[in-house]
Amino acid sequence: MKHKQTPDPKPAPLPTQLYDRLLSLLLYLLAFLIPLKFGLPNLDVASPVLPEDLARIVPNTADFLSAVFTLRLRTALSIIANALSSPWPEEIAQILVVLGLFLWGVKSLSQRRLILRVGKTDLMMWLFVLVGSVTTLFSPAVHSSFVVWRQFLSYALLYFLIVHAVDSSARQQRITKYLLISTSTVALLGLYQFALGFEEQARAVREQIVPHLQDAYLARLARGRVYSVFVYPNSFAGFLLAVLPLTVLCGFLHSDWFRKPNRHKGILFVLLLPLPCLISFFLTQSKAGYLTLFLVAVAAVIAARRKIRLRPRILLTGLIALIVILSAILLTPPGRRLILEKGAYTFEARIAYWRAGLKMIPRNPIIGSGLNSFGLLYPRYQLPGPHEAKSAHNNYLQILVETGILGFICFLGIWVFGLAAAFRHAREYFASENRLSSADALILSGLLGTACFLVHSFADFDLYVPGIAMTIWLYLGLIARNAPSFKERTLQLTERWRTGLTISFTLACAFVVYLSAKTLNATAHFAVADATLRQTDPPPTLGDYEDAISEMKKALWWDGGSQNLHVVLGRIYSRLGRYDDAVREYATADRLLSGLSPGIAHDIARAKLARMSRVGEVRWKEILSHFRDAVTRSPVSPFRRLVYAYYLSQAGHDRESREQLSELRRLDPSGKEALRAAGMLSPDDPLITELKQFLEESF
């Protein structure tokens, strides 16, 4: 089999060379930042902002050099880890992609011929984006849906940019080189977490993650599960699964490193890239990740058995030996605890998520309920048990729920058509005697990495983690460049058309950048307000609260559709006793979420109760209607039942209170889940103590 390499382009005029150099620099920066700075899952919460990261560079560098020169190596490692593990908002990635697209567009439209590469993958991808835009318009939470739709749009634009702008093998190799450098850094940070850094990472979680989400991450740290920059260990495992084939095939591509004269290069390569990736992967303790690696590795070995001259007898013996080793591990107490006991609990939780998701599909089977709506709808469809979820932990089910049958078909089409050319190339390569070329390595690693992503997607939400999803779409673009699945179409442009298209293209890119900048500005103001409210030495004063309110209003000026910002501002008003303002903000957030959030119904009830209690006239009928609404929105939540029963008792409705307590016993016989959820409210909330006492007396 002869593979046609893409020829390097001929020298271009000076302006075109300038555009090419800027575009190359931007692509290399993006490839480096994808795993390193965009690993934060989409939690619909604000993340640290870019200006603060830049402001810390100089003092952090000075502290690092001081630690190195004084041989305080642990301090130096801590400074590096904290700097690397601070994620950037994904809007930065979106802006970088759009800037790259702008550079390509201006360069291409300056010529009389515009070359477009289109195929079935592109059709499925843009149809999926179109369906996503339609379902966003009808979503119960338009703002949250729009955030994820813009995220998916950036993936499609990244693919388009790779297909159209990465037109030389040299540029492809540099992109993969920077991706691998970043991957090595991420994997080594995972090893640092396991060896030295759990205390520092626990502090980072308390500083960067909203309070009601901290417990889950701190519990994972307590079990010694590493997550590097991905916050969630299973997401870290999903990323490592995607890049492991590239790290291994890169070693095969440079086989001369492992011969005697250059053996030091091979040893250094193994110690810095594949070995840290593999060890960090096992330290994530992701059972779904282990299973995915096993399945894809076995399939890859079977497909390549003739190429690597592996006899069927040896293959069968190896599989039997592997099964024996796994069985021996399961016979040990640590093995049973790690794989069977913990695995059974997580599998049981996922089954609960999936059953709830299947119940959501009939709500809108054609176009779905709206992107990022699963977590909002989940409380209403949740099954009894201590299972809370923001996502389905199954990409396919979540896409089916959120975009309906139309979006699901387009989503599957992306992978069917996107990987078809890679499958054909792999089959031809394994049947040939050709040595591994750089194009072969990119196609095979992209195919295997995407296969790991697709298998792991049955048990997790990798699609909603920018650091993973952008890596996969980068693979799709590189596969399309090296195993073409598109047709080139040339458009002859007149001067008038070029001018019109350039202006339109510039305005479109500027508008997309403006949308991302709006979110970044809102995030920046929110971060200032949040830092003000979190200070403990000294505690926030009345002036600090007023400053925080001013910052929150600025954030809402930039992003008034964010229900989270309205909720935060409402809670600040509640702390200050400005209950009318708090109710107004809560009501706005409730409207933005189509009246589906049980937490907001709870907040409205407590703010109104506090306001009425201040004047000494509590209208219990109105207050109880809000707490009842919270129970209706989350019917199997023990915590909502406990709160409703408590306030029914306070209002003198003892019979109704006993009925709610009876239902609470059915849902949560010990009451532990209700108290756990109560404790996540706020450690200094007096309601928690009252609920504990009420539950002890009632149970």
Image (cartoon, rainbow, N blue to C red):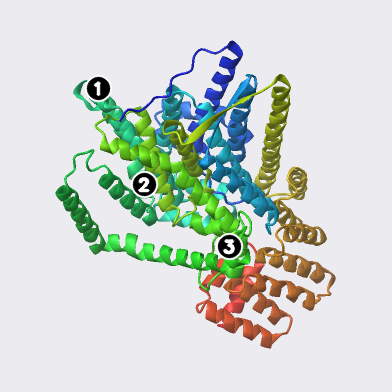
Q: Amino acid at mark 1?
A: Asn
x and y, in percent, of residue 453 in the image: 43, 48
Which residue is under mark 2?
Answer: 281
Q: Amino acid at mark 2?
A: Phe
Identify the residue at horizontal 63%, vertical 56% (top origin).
370
Front-most of residues 513 and 517: 513
Characterize the local packing of mark 2: few (<14), some (14-19) or many (20 or more) Cα atoms within 10 angstroms: many
Which residue is under mark 3?
Answer: 680
* Quadrant in the picture for the C terminus: bottom right
User: In the image, is 668 to the left or to the right of 309?
Assistant: right
Identify the residue at horizontal 62%, vertical 57% (top origin).
367
Tag on residue 262? 1
Question: Considering only order in the chain, which callout, 2 or 3, is on the residue closer to the N terminus?
Answer: 2
Residue 289 visible somewhere in the drawing: yes
From this view, report whether residue 261 is shown above or below residue 410: above
Residue 362 placement: quadrant: bottom right
| Helix, strand or loop for disc 3 | loop
Residue 427 placement: quadrant: top left
Q: Are marks 1 and 2 in contact (CB under 8 Å)?
A: no
> Which residue occupies the extreme left position in the image?
313
